[in-house]
Image (cartoon, grey):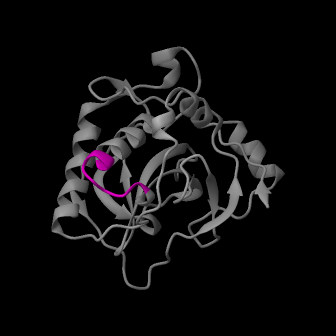
Amino acid sequence: MLAAIAVNVSGCASFRDGSPSNIVVAASNAPAMADGSTASPPPGFVGFCMHNLAACTGRTAGPTEVALDDQVKGILLTVNSQINDEITYETDMEQFGVANRWSLDAVGGYGDCKAYALAKRQALLAAGLPEGALRIAIVRTPQDELHAVLTVDTDAGNLVLDSLTPEIRPWSQTGYVWLLRQSSDDPLRWVTLAQTGNSQPEPGPDLIGEILAH
């Protein structure tokens, strides 16, 4: 069943906390982040892929999670911290004069949450992490803002690299409501999340209208 949902992530949360860099590993009884129904990708992401085919195609079969050893922990902390420091937050409207644009060119310049997530994904790919474990997700914050983050699927749980904090946390400990993320086998295919206490139920007309209103 194709979920008729179009997430137009035009604005992102911009507050960043001052937590020390750290990786919090999920408790053994924490829920796993499981795929739900196939969903329409964010419209801005489709436009991004039209101009950045290499970032959206050509995935080969491979691992869909990474072993969270000390080396990988160091890579994740370094990438999350460096990208957060190397991009200055600015909305798409302020930078481009449009409401929704996904861009890979923000490092050393300006961008919003989508730019941080894309840059982290590219940096982790360059560091040798498997593409199938690196998945951009769309969430709703406790302040009711749509926000994009990068998830990293590991053997110790699903971790979140976020532009709002240097701390890397399990998905179930972010305080976010999870809406969509990329599938592990195709970056152009997006999915809802199987319903848990942290994920949004299968979207209906009211939710679609709420998301499109952002």
Q: Does 85 sit above or below residue 173?
A: above
Residue 131 image offset from top left, x and y in percent: 41, 54
Q: Does 9 sit above or below residue 204?
A: above
**In this rendering, position of residue 168 left or right of residue 36:** left
Q: Is residue 121 magenta?
A: no
Residue appearing at x 69%, y 43% in the figure = 211
Residue 112 image offset from top left, x and y in percent: 43, 32
Residue appearing at x 50%, y 16% in the figure = 96
Q: Where is residue 156, by image quadrant?
A: bottom left
Outermost residue toward the top in this view:
97
Residue 60 image offset from top left, x and y in percent: 46, 55
Q: Nearer the viewer, residue 198 or 69?
A: 69
Residue appearing at x 77%, y 56% in the figure = 2
Residue 37 image offset from top left, x and y in percent: 70, 63
Q: Where is residue 34, by image quadrant?
A: bottom right
Outermost residue toward the right in this view:
205
- Please state, as top left, top right, bottom left or bottom right, where the C terminus lies in the image: top right
Q: Where is residue 200, by image quadrant?
A: bottom right
Q: Is residue 130 magenta?
A: yes
Q: Is residue 13 visible?
A: no
Residue appearing at x 75%, y 51% in the figure = 207
In the rendered structure, which segment of residues is drawn in magenta? 124-131
Q: Is residue 39 visible?
A: yes
Q: Does 115 sit above or below residue 175?
A: above
Q: Nearer the viewer, residue 125 or 11?
A: 125
**In this rendering, position of residue 148 left or right of residue 8:** left
- Please state, as top left, top right, bottom left or bottom right, where the N terminus lies in the image: bottom right
| Marker count (numbered) | 0
**In this rendering, position of residue 130 left or right of residue 126:** right
Q: Nearer the viewer, residue 48 or 16?
A: 48
